[in-house]
Image (cartoon, rainbow, N blue to C red):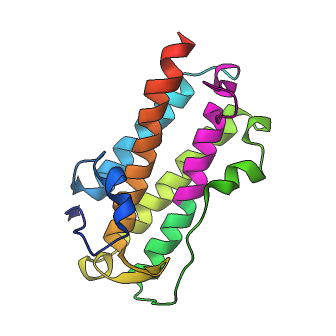
Amino acid sequence: MYIPKPKAGEYNSVWDTYFATVDEGDIHQLLISQGKQICDLYSSLTEEQSLYRYAEGKWSLKDVLGHIIDTERLMTYRILVAGRGDLTPLPRHADVYVSLTNFDRRPLQDLIEEYRIVRASSASLIHGLTEAEINQFCILNEVKTSAAAGAYFVLGHAQHHMNVVHERYLPRLT
């Protein structure tokens, strides 16, 4: 389903930077394509490389993937809430989840498989929404937010972090 990028007023404007990193189009195909790219990139890493941090106090490559997984899980719940027209206010989430676990303890292949499953589930949920449902809203952090905005957030958030991986991690691994 072709879904145009959301317009101002359909989401919290702090998401603009995420939306700027992705094209609009067939959201299901964009999710599938991006998911494959992320899995391919992480599959090319060794276990040792996946532990790399580009600076003291920065996330490892495993932490980055774990953060993408956690955030996507949270956002797909919000997409579901919006798509069903539930206006129960939802709180924002913070990036603290990475600090509350240890993604480095997990084998890289397990994280890749978890990401693959989460992305397939996200793509399936979004693909199954009707045009009316994708245009419905929820209340997220006191801001009226459309399901379509949530879908583009999933893409843009992951792309933002992959851009950081390409700029700050990968050049130092070679």
Q: Vertically, is 114 above or below 85?
A: above
Pick the residue in front: 128 or 18.
18
Query: Would you say 32 lies left or right of 174 here?
Result: left
User: In this view of the protein, can residue 170 be seen by the observer?
Assistant: yes
Query: Would you say 122 lies left or right of 111 here?
Result: left
Number of marks in the image?
0
**Rendered-image quadrant of the N terminus:** bottom left
Instruction: State the image coordinates of residue 90 (x, y, percent, origin top left).
Output: 54, 80
State which region is magenta. Answer: 48-72
Which residue is at the far top? 174
49 inside magenta stretch: yes
Instruction: State the image coordinates of residue 166 (x, y, percent, origin top left).
Output: 44, 26
Q: Vertically, is 75 above or below 100?
A: below
Pick the residue in front: 114 or 138.
138
User: In this view of the protein, can residue 35 be seen by the observer?
Assistant: no
Instruction: State the image coordinates of residue 13 (x, y, percent, origin top left).
Output: 34, 65
Q: Vertically, is 110 above or below 165?
A: below
**Residue drawn at (53%, 24%), measured in percent from left and top?**
169
**Residue drawn at (28%, 78%), measured in percent from left and top?**
135
**Residue drawn at (38%, 69%), measured in percent from left and top?**
12
151 inside magenta stretch: no
Pick the residue in front: 48 or 109.
48
Instruction: State the image coordinates of residue 103 (x, y, percent, origin top left).
Output: 73, 41
Q: Vertically, is 120 above or below 124?
A: above
Tell me the quarter of the picture where residue 137 sits.
bottom left
Magenta stretch mostly in which secondary structure?
Answer: helix
**Residue drawn at (46%, 33%), measured in percent from left and top?**
164
